[in-house]
Amino acid sequence: MMTMHWWRIRLIRPIFLLLGCLSVQTASADVAIETFERRPAIQNALLEVRLEGLLPTLMRETGTDMWLVIAREYNDDPVFLSLVPKPRFTARRTTMLVFFDRGDEGVERLTVSRYPLGSLYQSAWEGGDLDAQWQRLAEVIAERNPKTIAVNTSDTWPVADGLSHTLYQKLEAALGDGLKGRIRSSEQLVVRWMETRTEEEVEVWQRGVAIARETIAKAFSSEVITPGITTVGDVAWFIRTRFEEEGLEPWFHPDVNRQWEGADFGENAPFLGDGSEDGIIRRGDVLHTDVGLCYLGLCTDTQEMGYVLKLGESEPPAGLVEAMRTGNRWQDALTAEFVTGRTGNEILASAQASLKKMGIQHAIYTHPLGVYGHAPGPTIGMWDNQGPTIGRGDWPLYPMTGYAIEGNVVVRVPEWNNQRVQMKLEQSALFDGNTVHYLAERQKALHVVGF
């Protein structure tokens, strides 16, 4: 079994190299995207590192000596595709994965399934009908005599609740009275598996985040926007089309909206802006977009702001420039509270206290990020709940975990008759145990749409 210091981060490939030495603050040459035929090999190499080096560590950390992942075709367990080699889009028939910790020999990986899973899993069944498959699974378990049998059931974590009711019943029936009493929830292992990134994954993840940021930079430029003609829906579909054409998987449709001088969205509105698809972008508009894509098995989540110059302007009004700086100060205050072992609720409370002293009107709704856009791990506030989040907010912060540093600040802009403007920001980041690293830097200046 290989040794991998997965709790340390090596940002070996500086992000400016990934971007061809060009800033992502303005439109630039496209960030390189791997061809379809290269992607499975890259993902499978990353998976092998995770299975060989990370999984044994996490099984021992969570006291798991046997873990079962059982899925049926088109009714996949949410964790299933994170465990099997590509290209694969769903389980075949009933697919059974067995992980058993043999101590110094490492974690044994078996599949009790009709179709093979490549070199990463040893087949433990020669075939037969469904009854024979369940019988063989029971034999595999009995032969290893585990103290506990962890299965994917959870009330708190949807991604850890993938074992269907029917499959659970079939498992109990196959195990019989002697073994079914050893069944336990695997939720701690599933969350740790899904939230933890390896060094090798971080290097790949940076590229995906850079692609998202570069796409936003191009969308918020005169290459795409013609004031008085282009709608916010046009910009959203430009982003979505770019992803689809490049074979990049959006995990939600891009959101684009606008604020403008004289607009009144109400003092109690949680979000300021109009996102009507047919809303025409005008000079003097403040633009916002929310974009999420998944690339090589890892998801990104990015929100950035832009400004459309008025006739005679060469830069945004000073009040909007300062609003952007206030947003960066909000980010710094939040990430300063990231301390290993703190829960999401504790981080939220500490950051709120710090921001109150700074006099920054804000909202925090930061979430874990990884295999899924809304991934398992510590929830740090929600847009509709700025207090503790029971359950998911009680999860502690671990090293080598990813987050969408998400929230907003509200700033009054002197040039707009002291009108409120909202800076809605979100950047993909990694916590290495000591520091929060933005995976492709972060926005520090408004994207500017000129002529």
Image: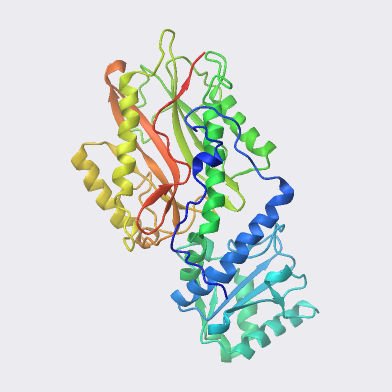
Image-based side of 157 in relation to 390, left or right: right
Residue 369 in percent (x, y) is at 48, 52
Q: Residue furthest top?
A: 312
Compared with 18, 216 (above or below) is above
The quadrant the N terminus occupies is bottom right
* Residue drawn at x 53%, y 66% as measured from the top left: 161
Colour scheme used in the picture? rainbow
Q: Nearer the viewer, residue 278 or 338?
A: 338
Locate residue 311, reporting x and y percent: 44, 8
**As drawn, is 250 to the left or to the right of 363?**
right
Based on the displayed image, in which of its 4 quarters is residue 406 positioned?
A: top left
Looking at the picture, tell me which residue is in the foreground, 337 or 81: 337
Seen in the picture, residue 172 relative to 220 is either above or below; the reply is: below
In percent of width and height, residue 165 lies at 60, 70
**Image vertical order of residue 363 relative to residue 138, above or below:** above
- Where in the figure is residue 9, as x and y percent of width and height? 45, 57
Residue drawn where x is 44% and y is 40% of the image? 441
Task: Give whichever of 34, 275 is nearer the camera.
Answer: 34
Identify the residue at image location x=34%, y=25%.
321
